[in-house]
Amino acid sequence: MQITINQLIQAKQEKRQIVVLTAYDFAMAQILDRVGIDIILVGDSLAMVALGYETTLPVTLDEMVHHAKAVRRGVKQSLVVVDLPFLSYQESPQQAMHSAGRVLKETGAQAVKLEGGNPAIAHTVSVLTSVGIPVMGHVGLTPQSVHQLGYRKQGKTAESGDRILAEAIALQDAGAFAIVLEHIPADLAAQISQKLIIPTIGIGAGPHCDGQVLVINDLLGLSVRLPPFAKAYTNLREIISEAVQNYCADVREGRFPE
Ligand code: KIV
């Protein structure tokens, strides 16, 4: 049985942490699903960690849909959320409806995520949720605004903290079912998590959120540079390099095939 949005809200009420990871392909999605990850996010971090771009901006809706279809084929239980990429939703609520509709219809994912919480974005979220499209919000450091914000921690002053809190409340009021809080002070994340009925999912936002998300490549030690708030649980770059070196040596020295 697939995890539902109501179960996530119940998890918050029962103080059970929600576990979220990104995935970009079938094989990884199958592993995460079987381990029991609550939400698999086909993040637009795809642009950087799987497609080799410098930022998340270049990835297209077609590319997101392509990868989300592969992820969805590997999943039986986790809730699958797909990022709407840069400029696939900011133009108008109609553009957002078209993009989110494509994601749900073509990939079989259950929800979309979009960045920001200003009044225009909150309005877009209310339009999407009014037609039954579940939306996850994302405030704090929003990588699609890298050319304005950089990758710096957000919400460090009282004024910007208040703005992020107001954005989170506006997104909840617009019908978002959860909100990612990225790279903000832990006490601000705690305050937002306490104020909201819907779950907050933190990344670089301290331990007081209702769940946590990491980019799978960071967790596995595949990323060359790790964000300061990420944690590598293994070093797959080394493990894969060693396996490939062993294969090279076996082929070159006639040990494989036997
Ligand atoms: O694109 C992504 O992977 C994300 C997570 C870091 C939350 O948005």
Image (spheres, rainbow, N blue to C red):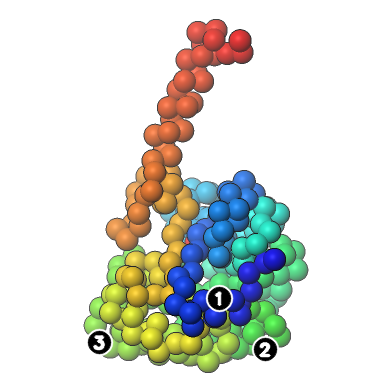
> Is the CB of mark 1 within 8 Å of ligand 1?
no
Residue type (three-letter) at the residue carrying disc 2: Ser
User: In screen coordinates, is 76 left or right of 248?
Assistant: right
Task: List x then y, in percent, for residue 7.
Answer: 59, 76
Residue drawn at the location 54% of the way across and 80% of the way down: 9
Closer to the camera, 55 or 79? 79
Tell me which numbered mark, 1 or 3, is placed earlier along the sequence.
1
Find disc 1 in the rendering and name its residue: 8
Crowd around label 2: few <14 · some 14–19 · many ≥20 (10 Å): few
Relative to 1, does residue 247 appear above or below in the rendering?
above
Query: Which residue is identified by label 2?
Result: 130
The outermost residue toward the left is 157
Q: Which of 3 and 74 is in front in this view?
A: 3
Q: Where is residue 97 in the image (x, y as percent from the top left)?
A: 68, 79
Residue 111 falls left or right of residue 202: right
Percent of width and height locating residue 25: 61, 50
The secondary element bearing badge 3 is classed as helix
Q: Which of 35 and 102 is in front in this view?
A: 35
Q: Distance between the residues labelled 2 and 1?
A: 20 Å
